[in-house]
Image (cartoon, rainbow, N blue to C red):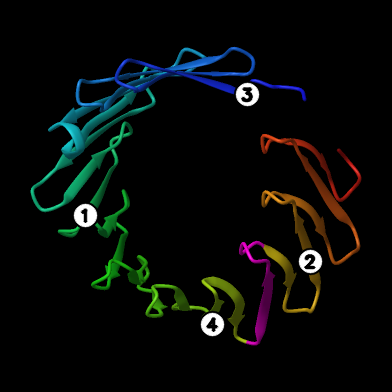
Amino acid sequence: VTELNVVSYRYDDAWRLIEATNAVGESERYRYDDQQVILERELAGGASFFWEWERSGKAARCMRHWASFSQMNTRYAWDDNGCVTVHNADGSQEVYVHDQRARLVQRIDPDGAEHFKSYDDKGRLTVEQDPLGAVTAYQYDEAGRLVALFPGDDEPTSYEHNNGFVRVVRRGNAVWKYQRNDQGDITRKTDPDGFVTDYTYNKHGKLTGVWHPDNSSQRLTWNERGQLTEEQLANGGV
């Protein structure tokens, strides 16, 4: 068996990731405060990214995010009602409004365009409205699975599930069908025109083959560590 060192990681005494080195020896480095909040990320090429925070630990809020190059310098202004104003390096502003459960309910773009989101009592997205007023609605079953999507300017889409997985998707007269194995992996996909694509997997659930409707195929080979070692493309390339 040939071993290949893809990425190695180094941690400090507090088990914080402080360095990641790729196969050719290029390293990224990370620095934190005493509450485990990141302060700096240094890329292998020398560029660095920095964060400035208010509060501490899990309650920390970013006040500024900048880099060692001048094009990136973003400041964040928070209020006590879940609203943050983002001041970009080019002078533009964006506004994000959150509800009491920290869910995004409104976004205002630099040009003033407004986006809205609504949620149900279980935290699931139910309605979105874009700046032009188009509304998209989402419907769920009792298990929390998406069963219907109603876009404001397109045909509704419905989703049929079996054992927790999507089996059939319908949009108008178009129907997509999916067959799955016991692990939930798609083994066959049938598109609205009746064309069939088949998929095979190894015992570890890794995709090993794709057979397209035009009789072309794609093959993938994995080693014992689950790493992709070879891919044969549909056009015969490797």
Residue 196 at x, y percent in the picture: 80, 71
Residue receiving disc 1: 102
The amino acid type found where label 1 is placed reads Ala
Closer to us: mark 4 or mark 2?
2
Which amino acid type corresponds to the residue marked 2 in the rendered image?
Thr
User: Of label 4 and label 2, which has the lower sequence position?
Assistant: 4
How far is mark 4 from mark 2, CA to CA?
25 Å
Upstream in sequence: badge 3 or badge 4: 3
Q: Quadrant of residue 108?
A: bottom left
The crowding category of the residue bearing disc 1, from other C-alpha atoms within 10 Å (few below 14, some 14 to 19, many at least 20), is: few
Numbered mark located on residue 197 in the image: 2
Q: Give me the C-alpha separation between circle 2 and circle 3.
A: 32 Å
Q: Name the residue under label 3.
A: 6
Mark 3 lies on a secondary structure that is loop
Q: Mark 4 points at which residue?
A: 155
Give the residue displayed 59% in from the left and 81% down from the top.
171
Q: Position of residue 155 (x, y in %)?
A: 54, 82
* Mark 1 to mark 2 CA distance (whole Å): 41 Å
